[in-house]
Amino acid sequence: MKIKVADTFINLYFIIVCLLIAMPFVLVISISLSSEDSLHQFGYQFLPKEWSLEAYRIVFEKPEPLLRGYGVTIAITVIGTVLSLFMTALMAYPISRSDFRYQRPLTFYVFFTMLFNGGLIPFYILMTQYLHLKNTLAALIIPAIMSPFNIMIMKGFLDKISREIIESAKVDGAKEYRIFFVIILPLSTPALATLGLFIAFGYWNEWFNALLFIDNDKFVPLQLLLVRILSQAEFLANSPMAEAADKLKFAKFPTLTVRMAMAIIASGPMLVIFPFFQKYFVKGLTVGSLKG
Amino acid sequence: MSNIPPAGLSSSPEQPAAPAPVKRKSWLAKELWHIRRNRELILLALPGVLFKLVIAYLPMVGLILAFKYFRYDQGIFGSKWVGLANFEFLFKAQDAFRIIRNTLLYNFSYILLTMAISLLLALLLNELTSKLIKVYQTTLFLPYFISMVLVGYIGNAFLDFENGYLNTIFTFFGLKTHNWYLETTPWIFILPLVALWKGVGFSTLVYFAGITGISTDYYEAARLDGASRVQMMTRITLPLLKPLVIILFILGLGNIFRGDFGLHYFVPNNVGPNFPTTDIIDTYVYRALTKLGDINSAAAVGFLQSVVGLVTVVTANLIVRRIDKDNALF
Amino acid sequence: MVNNKKNRLIAKLLSVALVFVILAACSSNNNGNNNPTPAPTTEPSTAASDTPAESTEPALDPVKLTFLYPVAADPGPDQKLVNEEINKYLQEKINATVELKPLTFDEYEPKLNAMLAANENFDIAWSSKGWLGNYQPYIDRGAYLEITDDMLAKYAPEARANIPDKFWPDMLAADGKVYGFPIYQVAAKQKSLIIQKRFIDKYSLDVSTIHSYSDIELFLKTLKENEPDVVPLGLAQNSRGMYIDSTVAGTDGSPVYYKKDDPAYTLSTFLNTANDRLPYYQKLHEWYEKGYINQDAPVLQNINDLKAKGNVAVSIEFTSKPGGEIGEKAINGGNDVVYAPISESYFTGIASAMHVINKNSKNPERALMFINLLNTDKYLYNLICNGIEGKHYEKVDDLNIKPIEGSGYAPNGDWVFGNQFNAYLKPGQAADTWQKTIELNDNAVVLASSGFTVNEESFKSEVANINAVKNEYETALETGAVDPNKVLPEYVSKLKASGMEKVDTEVAKQWEAFLAQKGLK
């Protein structure tokens, strides 16, 4: 009885928190579904005063770049997440082992790259002149494969795996790579799922590398399309060149509804991906259950 | 305390002050022996180490740009050295104190606030058994999808003087309305709130995943001993989450001198009168340098931010190591 | 403990050593791969300069040029098609092909920067004074090629002839050399108030009585009292103020300001004139408090977002140009507007948009010839601006065209491609638009400061901090949102503390030198 009351309270608490958190998101959806005129007249509303699909019609007017963008984004997200997850776990495992002689220097080696980076110019030169990755999908995948942040979090998850289980495997004569693949990886499913989600999310949102390294339309990901639409209005508004720009066209710049619709279209699919990863946040998949 | 060697190194004896040449030889031999002993783990780490070397460490030659006057026709190495000239503008800045104070205080508050709230949420989520957990998680994560530019628009819907919801609510309760963007005090609350809104889902998920990784054996044993839910929470879950908490905390400290540009630029909307409480290093530098195209000064600021981050992290790590060496990051 | 430290040191040493090894390997690798494009690397500088300009045609080797320019949005799927069409024509004309690389505004700067730093192959870029691809800073960093009078005479004589000589000094960089070719367009600025016609008619305002900002006060008052849903004066972060001192020569973007009647051209700096501006700021603050000005003025990024509602009665135009009212009508929600000038028409320079040649360009001569064509060849210019006739636009008559909606090519940037007076007129533009603009340019007051560029190298850290301070205070004061009696002194003292006086002294020094050199002193 007591437990049930507590449960209800916790649920109630979460419902309130979630409502508060979702509110602004609802606003975005509502704006994207409002008519531009009603926005001017009534301001932002949580429920559109005048419903309109105009913004979505405009976005989908020329669907090819959008569909291509989806294709590119899905490709880099899938390939990137798999590669990145593997590399992250591979790096995190040795530096999570306190009996590994080089644990601390290597941890620092990884962590240092989170603090320091050479900046845009050397990185661009490396990627284009030495690695010849301009206009390739690899240019969108490689830079984010080993995020030091993710490696550290993975290390944090792996730190908890009890030493005994590794020791007992070693006594049985198992090599480290076997321990990694056969014991560590299956044991870390929730951790991998969590990181996989973050990594997938990172790739899904990737646009800056595309801006730098992609010249042709073939490999432009979705988020870069969105960023271009979001920024152009502001850019021209604040530029002295506005004087020279054709004012007739100025008036036609993407409106707020279109910007919001673009955001929904760009982030929507991630909501589908989310449950896919959630499947693996299973409780009870533990050392104990594997021992048997 | 500090004299006890770390667990992993216990096999290697303390080095006595021996004559140099003899010592070096034996030391090298010993090191080679260690490398052979650790070769499997070294091999596992090798791909990542090499990858980092090329992708992250090679471009770090660019750090010298902070001390150079870069010319396109002379290249990174050919450009002339200028010493600390690129740091000059930051040291001369009238607002140096203001932006450093804001950056540090806001970052601390974001780290602590997000940590406390998301730990709480993760613990509570863990108490639930219903299918609703998934809905909650997804909702908490929603704000993570929205770019800061759009958050700026949404913020405007709440904070607008004439039509904003906040003023509508204030009017409803008979309170005085505010021109939020022109005031300073409200931002001390608004910015952490937005940061929390945006980031709490991420940390909650990390902690929740950490909790799901905890062996049920512990809880079974505790239940047999008649422990209450709250006791299990504070005696089992929290202590076992400590490594994760410390890692997230130290990671946060690494960026202590680097503010969230998007949050501090698009949400307060670049309105001068609120700068006393919203301006941070990153926004200041953007405003100062954006017209000048000064690559070197930008590099200098970045370098400084990294160095401060490094010092903070190393110090924090030392402190952690003093208290509890197993939880130190490196 | 000791061991641990040593390990770290070794790891570090190892990594440093490896870095050098890899660096060496990469750079040697690079030497072999430096020229990915098969373009013939002739030495055109010697070859071409031997041939006189008239007979260049037969001697030209085929070359490939690359042209970077900013656009507001992706020009469309037919970009390639138009590019091919241009190449057909160019091959005939100067035996060259060009690869067009349109980049959206936000991409332009980082990409230009990265490509220059990486020595990537491109020939022509777009530049401006004070905006994208900022002229002086890039020149300081050795990015662009000097364009000498000789080169102009040989490769772009026709284009050069179109630019009035009295405007040319504007192209001079701080070192007195020229590094670009101007895109000729409207080059005069006149500040105006934009007033919606329906309110002029309703409240019978005599526009000819309006000569300065203060003349509009009564009208604003009337509007505030009678039109509850109307914003009497609409301002935003990008409105740029309307303070005009009629005794001072100079306008937004001028390098310096000076008293008109002063034969010594003594500089009129912000610090010296701050007190003169106080009444103006006070008036604005009064209007803001009374609700004449929209309350979100200091917050609003873009005034056009507000104007789109159609209920902004008065706003500011900092560059009223002939025919501008038509565009303004579209921005003002379809309401007719009238310009009421509040300043003289000043020559503001031809360097607000220009083409520059990459210092690394392998074919700078051909690049300049291409620039020459862009600025003189009507067919080429309109091809690149409007696309292919019949596919992307319909010809109405010899001068007027009608773009085909959704045709697949619309870069919308006549001002990035070349001499705008070669453009076909689009619907809504009056037949005499270009004549009127040229007249405006020719009649504009050319200031003594034309051709003067401040060299900021010796005080750039002060300039950086001053920029930040300006950004903090300017908009707030110019929109009337803050009390100037309190804020203006604070602003002034912060400018001084940031080294504004030092900057002013240095600028004055350079100004004196410039005047002396020009024989004005």
Image (spheres, rainbow, N blue to C red):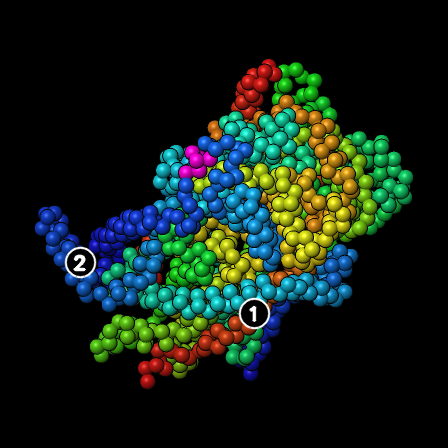
Residue A6 sits in which quadrant?
A: bottom right
Depth check: C102 or B198 in front? C102
Q: Is C44 contained in the magenta span?
A: yes
Q: Residue at x 62, y 48 (%)?
A: C384
- Foreground mark, 1 or 2? 1
How crowded pointer 2 is (Cα within 10 Å; few <14, some 14-19, many 20+) is rated as few
Q: Amino acid at mark 1?
A: Pro
Q: Quadrant of the N terminus of chain A?
A: bottom right
* Residue C243 magenta-highlighted: no
In the picture of the structure, the residue carrying the numbered disc 1 is A269
Marks 1 and 2: same chain? no
The residue beneath circle 2 is B31
Magenta region, main secondary structure: helix
> Residue C423 sits in which quadrant?
top right
Chain under callout 2: B
Viewer can see residue C73? yes
Subunit that carries the residue with mark 1 = A
Labels 1 and 2 touching (C-beta < 8 A): no
Q: How many marks?
A: 2
In the image, B199 versus B283, the foreground residue is: B283
Q: Position of residue C80 (x, y in %)?
A: 57, 55
Is label 1 in a helix, a strand or a loop? helix
- Inspect the image, locate mark 2, and give the three-letter code of the amino acid beneath it: Glu
| Crowding near the residue tagged with mark 1, few <14, some 14–19, many ≥20 C-alpha atoms within 10 Å | few
Q: Is residue C444 left or right of residue A22?
A: right
Above or below, comparing residue C245 to residue A46 in the picture:
above
**Which residue shows up at 67% across the image and 34% down it?**
C187
Give the residues in magenta.
Answer: C43-48
**x%, y% of residue A32?**
68, 63
Q: Could you tell me which secondary element the residue under label 2 belongs to?
A: helix
Residue A154, image quadrant: bottom left
Q: Is residue A89 left or right of residue C183?
A: left
